[in-house]
């Protein structure tokens, strides 16, 4: 099963792929310095519509419940589920 993720461009990706990997496939660069380990917090994006995986412990620690409730996620941790996701790169 695949899903469509919208950044500034579209990328069709398989379910379970992180937003960071989807961005790379779409030739869209998202800032990061920890190699996708969820430690630096530089890859923050906002989910404008659609759904992604539940927040990881790393995201809860770095972003907090308030930011998560506003739709902010770490691109290296949030995984594509299904359907269409519209992502705003911060």
Image (spheres, helix red, strand yellow):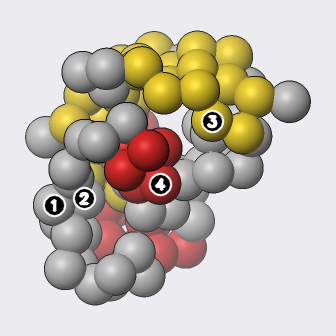
Q: In this figure, which residue is indicated by the disc labeled 4? A: 21
Q: In this figure, which residue is indicated by the disc labeled 2? A: 43
Count residues near mark 2 (Cα–Cα under 10 Å), then give few for <14, some for 14-19, many for 20+.
many
Q: In this figure, which residue is indicated by the disc labeled 1? A: 31
Marks 2/1 in contact by CB < 8 Å: the verdict is yes
Q: Does 29 sit above or below residue 7? A: below
Q: Earlier in the sequence, mark 2 or mark 4?
A: 4
Residue at the spot 54% in from the left edge and 53% down from the top edge: 18
Quadrant housing residue 47: top left
Residue 42 percent location from the top left of the image: 17, 65
Q: Give the numbered dot on residue 63.
A: none
Residue 82 percent location from the top left of the image: 73, 26
Count residues near mark 4 (Cα–Cα under 10 Å), then give few for <14, some for 14-19, many for 20+.
many
Marks 4/3 in contact by CB < 8 Å: the verdict is yes
Q: In this figure, which residue is indicated by the disc labeled 3? A: 13
Q: Does 54 sit above or below residue 57? A: above
Residue at the spot 57% in from the left edge and 65% down from the top edge: 56
């Amino acid at each position: 099963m695949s899903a469509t993720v919208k950044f500034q461009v579209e990328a069709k990706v398989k379910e379970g792929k992180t937003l960071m990997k989807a961005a790379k496939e779409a030739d869209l660069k998202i800032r990061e310095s920890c190699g996708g380990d969820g430690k630096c917090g530089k890859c923050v994006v906002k989910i404008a519509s659609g759904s992604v995986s539940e927040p990881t412990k790393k995201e809860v620690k770095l972003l907090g419940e308030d930011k998560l409730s506003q739709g902010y996620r770490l691109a290296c941790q949030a995984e594509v589920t299904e359907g269409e996701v519209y992502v705003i790169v911060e």
